[in-house]
Image: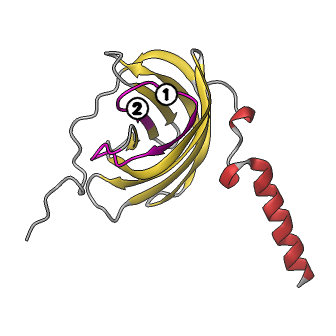
């Protein structure tokens, strides 16, 4: 019994050292780097390039996290303004019911997952980049049973205008239900 309690304590302390939900503290990441975990329809660790900037028309701020090895791109999108420090809800990407929404794209298939809800914590927002964490749930554009839970930490490198084109969502939440 004591052995199990000691193991539980060691595990809890190990997770606490990594930061929120077992993730790396953004202060421990290099500029231009992200890491985190995805669970649900896909399970695993993601890490790679972290960029921030605005759309090519300078209309919306973006954070783009790309794991080229896993073929996964995570985009956090401010629909109406610029990112600034603080904690903000991540809304439903189909309804755009919050200022910030998120998407996950599988690079090899082109499939999109649209955020349903979540939260983003922006610790440091400067002209040279953004440091923070994000946790959100996303649903497949084709099947509402395909769900991802995404937890990431990032320190972006500012890249100016980012080419980002999201055609109208094909999410099952946007489709009328058949009778």
Please indicate whether residue 10 sits to the left or right of residue 160 in the image: right
Mark number displayed over residue 83: 1
Marks 1/2: CA–CA distance: 7 Å
Above or below, comparing residue 104 to residue 163 in the picture: below
Residues rendered magenta in the picture:
75-97
Above or below, comparing residue 44 to residue 103 in the picture: below
Q: Residue 56 at x, y = what percent?
A: 34, 16
Secondary structure at badge 1 equals loop
Determine which quarter of the picture holds residue 168: top left
The single residue placed furthest to the right in the displayed view is 2
10 Å crowding of disc 1: few (<14), some (14-19), many (20+): many
Please indicate whether residue 174 sits to the left or right of residue 77 in the image: left
Q: Is residue 58 magenta?
A: no
Mark number displayed over residue 78: 2
**For the stretch drawn in magenta, what is the main secondary structure?**
loop
Looking at the rendered image, the quarter that the N terminus falls into is: bottom right
Q: Residue at x 40, y 33 (%)?
A: 77
Please indicate whether residue 177 sits to the left or right of residue 122 in the image: left
Determine which quarter of the picture holds residue 21: bottom right
Q: Residue at x 23, y 57 (%)?
A: 172
The single residue placed furthest to the left in the displayed view is 179
Looking at the rendered image, the quarter that the C terminus falls into is: bottom left
Q: Residue at x 39, y 37 (%)?
A: 99
């Amino acid at each position: 019994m004591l052995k199990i309690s000691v193991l539980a304590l060691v595990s809890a302390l190990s997770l606490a050292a990594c930061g929120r939900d077992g993730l790396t503290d953004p202060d421990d990441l290099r500029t231009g780097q992200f890491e985190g975990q995805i669970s649900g329809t896909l399970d695993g660790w993601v890490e790679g390039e972290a960029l921030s900037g605005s759309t090519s028309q300078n209309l919306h701020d973006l954070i783009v996290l790309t794991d080229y090895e896993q073929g996964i791109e995570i985009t956090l999108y401010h629909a109406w303004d610029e990112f600034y420090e603080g904690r903000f809800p991540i809304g439903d990407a189909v309804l755009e019911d919050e200022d910030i929404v998120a998407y996950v794209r599988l690079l090899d298939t082109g499939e999109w997952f649209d955020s349903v809800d979540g939260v983003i914590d922006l610790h440091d927002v400067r002209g040279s980049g953004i440091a923070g964490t994000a946790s959100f749930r996303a649903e497949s554009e084709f099947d509402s049973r395909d769900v991802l839970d995404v937890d990431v930490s990032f320190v972006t490198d500012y890249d100016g205008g980012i080419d980002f084109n999201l055609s109208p969502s094909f999410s099952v939440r946007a489709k009328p239900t058949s009778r």
